[in-house]
Amino acid sequence: MSKLAALPSVEKLATALAPQVSLPRPLVNLFVRREIDHYRQLLLADGEHTREEIENATQKGLREFANSRLQSVINATGVLIHTNLGRSPLGPRAASALQEIATGYSNLEFDLPSGARGKRAGYLETALACLLETPAATAVNNCAAALVLTLRTLVAEGKNEVIVSRSELVEIGGGFRIPEILETSGAKLVEVGATNKTHLHDYEKAITPQTALILKVHRSNFYIDGFIGEPEIPEIAKLAHEHGLPLVEDLGSGAMMNTDELAPIEHEPTPQECLKRGIDLVIFSGDKLLGGPQSGIIGGRADLIAEIKKEPFFRAVRCDKLILTTLQESIDQYLETKADPTQADVPVLKFLRTPSDKLRARAEEILANLPSENISITIEDTLARPGGGTMPRSEFPSIALKLVPKNQSISKLAKTLRLGSPAIVGYTTDDALFLDLRTIFPESDRAVQQALKSALS
Ligand SMILES: *Cc1c(COP(=O)(O)O)cnc(C)c1O
């Protein structure tokens, strides 16, 4: 019993800690209560903990919990589409449309001319089809949902086999694996070919009366090289169509323009190209190279899109008005700038095409106003990456501040910047912390400078 006397009172400790974090008080109470319960168990199990130790650990834990609240971050990693940092930022136009729709009523499912119930996303679907130069399109919550929905729609009892090449049975990350996605959808995976080579006759031999479709999955986060080969899309499309089967491609990124014209990177296939080559349905993410909100877009044959929209599961993964607004804005911008998509107001495309000497000038500006006593700071040529499951082979020139602190460790400095306000996330190597300018918004340069100043003082 005497040991338990080390436990502080929940109310008292919460009152002492609450002013240190800007969190709702009930959440502070809950956190502190859980922490003290945890120590009660440890003490009962014969642990040795003093009150001071418990109070300090609770304080540290509470601060870390407060840091886990969704907040904006300065991305100094040089990875353009960083899934852990929220993928693509929206441009100002999409953000202001979001503000307007979010804070008022809208015609989400209301037809203004007739005053009757209207079609959700009717305008967006037409705009998407127009942009993709295809008969029909729709959007759901993300690319994974779009794939599950498409498979669920196209497979049926007794006709549920989906043919996929063994070189495309990929894991996207976060537990998203093609074989498991297929299983979730009620499809039966039929693997063909080998890891490095798949021939047209491999696909042909696998077709049975139970085949529902052929699926292509873009190798978006890895590449294979060496003794490799696969049939061209038009050959697979011809084979599929001769057997009355749809050919579906999970493309992943969905760049709306030739990104290799913006930076020295490899060509990322566009959905338009895929559809022209004979893909019946293409599926891709809205928040990768497209630069829109998290969403999954499906475009292609009108009869298949109509079936997908009738599938009951569609209702479970449909987009809300906030997503529809920002996606509508993103798509309209691409349509308006079709002659020159580089004019679209998409931050990741801007970052991609910023010349390195511009980045260098900004780095010099930041550096000029920093103290130099406790640290060595230099401007380095680095490599940035598209990231987000796009172009795994592509690295392109960038510029970073290279920081080597003298009286603290690299990891300590990196942590101080991560825990600052705003949080700054760079990357470390054995001998330095790097802050890559390519993914930092120019308007954040000042905040970076301030954060460095205070971290070094
Ligand atoms: C990123 C990716 C996905 C998953 O997209 P989400 O929008 O995150 O669901 C699926 N397939 C491929 C090929 C991808 O690159």
Image (tube, rainbow, N blue to C red):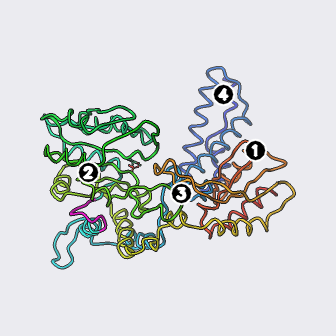
Secondary structure at badge 2 equals: helix
Read off the residue under disc 1.
431
Q: Nearer the viewer, residue 268 or 69?
A: 268
Between tags 1 and 4, which lies in front?
Answer: 1
State if disc 4 and disc 3 touch (CB < 8 Å): no
| Farthest residue, direction right | 373
First-in-chain label (4 vs 2): 4
Q: Percent from the top left, x then y, of residue 294?
A: 40, 56
Amino acid under disc 1: Asp
Read off the residue under disc 4.
4
In which image quadrant can residue 397 be found? Answer: bottom right
Secondary structure at badge 4 equals: helix
Between tags 2 and 1, which lies in front?
Answer: 2
Estimate the spatial distance between the alpha carbons at disc 2 and disc 1, rounded to whole Å: 50 Å
Read off the residue under disc 2.
234
**Residue 80: assigned label:** 3
Between tags 3 and 4, which lies in front?
Answer: 3
Amino acid under disc 2: Pro
Q: Residue at x 72, y 35 (%)?
A: 53
Crowdedness near tag 4: few (<14), some (14–19) or many (≥20) residues, C-alpha within 10 Å: some
Secondary structure at badge 3 equals: loop
- Disc 1 Cβ-to-ligand 1 distance below 8 Å: no
Q: Residue at x 26, y 32 (%)?
A: 190
| Farthest residue, direction front | 227
Amino acid under disc 4: Leu
Estimate the spatial distance between the alpha carbons at disc 4 and disc 2, rounded to whole Å: 73 Å
The boundaries of the magenta stretch are 131-138
